[in-house]
Image (spheres, rainbow, N blue to C red):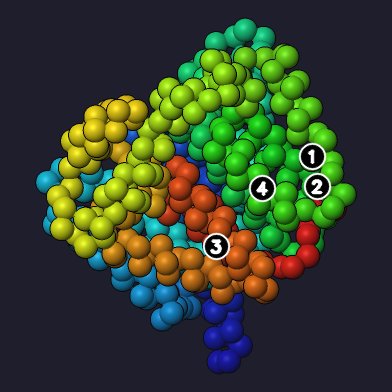
């Protein structure tokens, strides 16, 4: 009887482990093929729900995870009560529901599966991004599933836009650098690094400070020499990537006016300032109504330098959390950071991980992004894995 019980347990665990594979294989295609009008496509959440029901189900959720999951659910209710916009109620609910699902899955162990999924995604995104980058250089028109404006950004690969391509590639790179020593990490890290450069995303480039601090000294010197050379080569040979983005922004000189005249930077800076400073306390205490576009455009007019926003989308993820759920959204972010710290083996790694996740939340990366959740739940080692 004991043998039969062991066989049943082993069979049940095998079936559960098999359930994670659709999710792993779907990771590169979370934004494509497109069947819905927005950035979010159904493939990743469908496979995540399958994994939620069957992957390592001996303990559905840890008791220590209940507070953050409860607050995420409460954030859905608070937003729904305060808003009368049906579309954005559904969108906000999806963000927190996806966060809950991904958090539970990533907390169940099986780090090897997530490692395979991230490497698989890096390769697919790099190959498609490289094809798009070369095609643009040769004068061909690309028709990616995501948003692309020639001369203003790099290719988006198969993500929603170039900033997603670059920023999420940065999360993938940090995951690789945080793994325990593993042969072959170098080639995947190189692909992820190249994707950041090809994306032309300045926000992603700013995040490069984190992996540079993580690298051994010999690699830091290599990057310090190679990175400027690659940017110059990009400028001389193509009309996409980081160089063209910088030329577009500073075409009239290296001034703050040039940066503010760039619509993307203007809106991002304005949204961050409005949600995290100017309107913070009204949102934090849930005393202000939810009507972002009207409120922000009034604020932009008063500033004299900010441009109007055309939708209710809030560009920084943390700004959306604060504006929509106030102190509850802040609590979700705080618990996310606290639980992420627990996976670190030194104080310096705790600081690194906290600052990097915060930087991601000020980028377009949402807490509903599975790569960010996987990275937050990953155990960090003191040594560098690149070899």
Q: Secondary structure at mark 3?
A: helix
Q: Residue at x 46, y 24 (%)?
A: 257
What residue is rendered at 59% in x and 30% in y? 199
Q: Is residue 142 left or right of residue 52?
A: right
In the image, farthest residue toward the bottom: 1
Give the alpha-carbon distance from disc 4 to disc 1, as whole Å. Answer: 11 Å
Q: Residues within 10 Å of mark 3 (few under 14, many from 20)?
A: many
Relative horizontal placement of residue 289, taking residue 301 as reference (left or right): left
State which tag comes first along the sequence, 4 or 3: 4
Residue pointed to by mark 4: 209
103 relative position to 321: left or right: right
Question: Is residue 15 visible to us here?
Answer: no
* Residues under numbered marks 1 and 2 in contact, where contact means CB atoms less than 8 Å apart: yes
Residue 342 in the image: state x and y as whole percent.
Answer: 56, 74
Q: Nearer the viewer, residue 39 or 349?
A: 349
- Disc number at residue 300? none
Residues under labels 4 and 3: Cα distance? Answer: 14 Å
Q: Secondary structure at mark 4?
A: helix
Q: Which residue is mark 2?
A: 220
Name the residue: 29% across, 33% down. Answer: 303
Of callouts 1 and 3, the N-terminal one: 1
| Residues at discs 4 and 3 in contact (Cβ within 8 Å) | no
Q: Which residue is mark 1?
A: 224
Q: Do the residues bearing badges 2 and 4 touch, measured as CB atoms within 8 Å?
A: no
Residue ID at (70%, 34%): 194
């Amino acid at each position: 009887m004991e043998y039969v019980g062991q066989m049943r347990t082993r069979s049940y665990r095998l079936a559960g482990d098999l359930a994670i594979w659709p999710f792993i294989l779907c990771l590169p295609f979370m934004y494509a093929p497109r069947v819905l009008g927005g950035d979010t496509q159904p493939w990743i959440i469908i496979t995540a729900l399958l994994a939620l029901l069957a992957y390592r189900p001996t303990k559905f959720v840890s008791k220590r995870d209940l507070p953050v999951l409860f607050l995420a659910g409460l954030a859905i209710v608070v937003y729904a009560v305060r808003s009368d916009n049906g579309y954005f109620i559904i969108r906000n609910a999806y963000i927190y529901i996806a966060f809950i699902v991904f958090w539970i899955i990533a907390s169940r162990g099986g780090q090897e599966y997530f490692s395979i999924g991230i490497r698989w995604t890096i390769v697919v995104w790099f190959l498609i991004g490289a094809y798009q980058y070369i095609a643009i250089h040769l004068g061909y028109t690309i028709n990616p599933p995501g948003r692309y404006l020639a001369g203003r950004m790099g290719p988006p690969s198969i993500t929603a836009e170039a900033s997603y391509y670059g920023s999420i590639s940065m999360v993938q790179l940090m995951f690789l650098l945080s793994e325990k020593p593993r042969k072959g990490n170098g080639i995947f890290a190189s692909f992820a690094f190249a994707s950041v450069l090809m994306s032309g995303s300045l926000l992603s480039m700013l995040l490069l400070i984190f992996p540079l601090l993580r690298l051994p000294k010999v690699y830091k010197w290599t990057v310090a020499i190679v990175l400027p050379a690659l940017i110059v080569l990009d400028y001389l040979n193509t009309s996409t990537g980081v160089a063209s983005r910088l030329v577009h922004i500073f075409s009239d000189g290296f001034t703050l006016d040039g940066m503010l005249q760039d619509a993307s930077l203007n809106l991002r800076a304005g949204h961050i300032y409005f949600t995290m400073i100017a309107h913070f306390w009204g949102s934090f205490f849930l005393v202000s109504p939810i009507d972002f576009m009207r409120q922000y455009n009034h604020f932009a007019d008063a500033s004299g330098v900010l441009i109007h926003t055309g939708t209710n989308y809030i560009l920084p993820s943390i700004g959306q959390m604060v504006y929509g759920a106030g102190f509850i959204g802040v609590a979700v972010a705080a618990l996310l950071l606290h639980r992420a710290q627990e996976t670190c083996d030194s104080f310096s790694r705790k600081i690194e991980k906290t600052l990097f996740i915060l930087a991601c939340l000020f980028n377009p990366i949402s807490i509903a992004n599975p790569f960010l959740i996987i990275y937050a739940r990953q155990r960090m080692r003191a040594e560098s894995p690149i070899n």
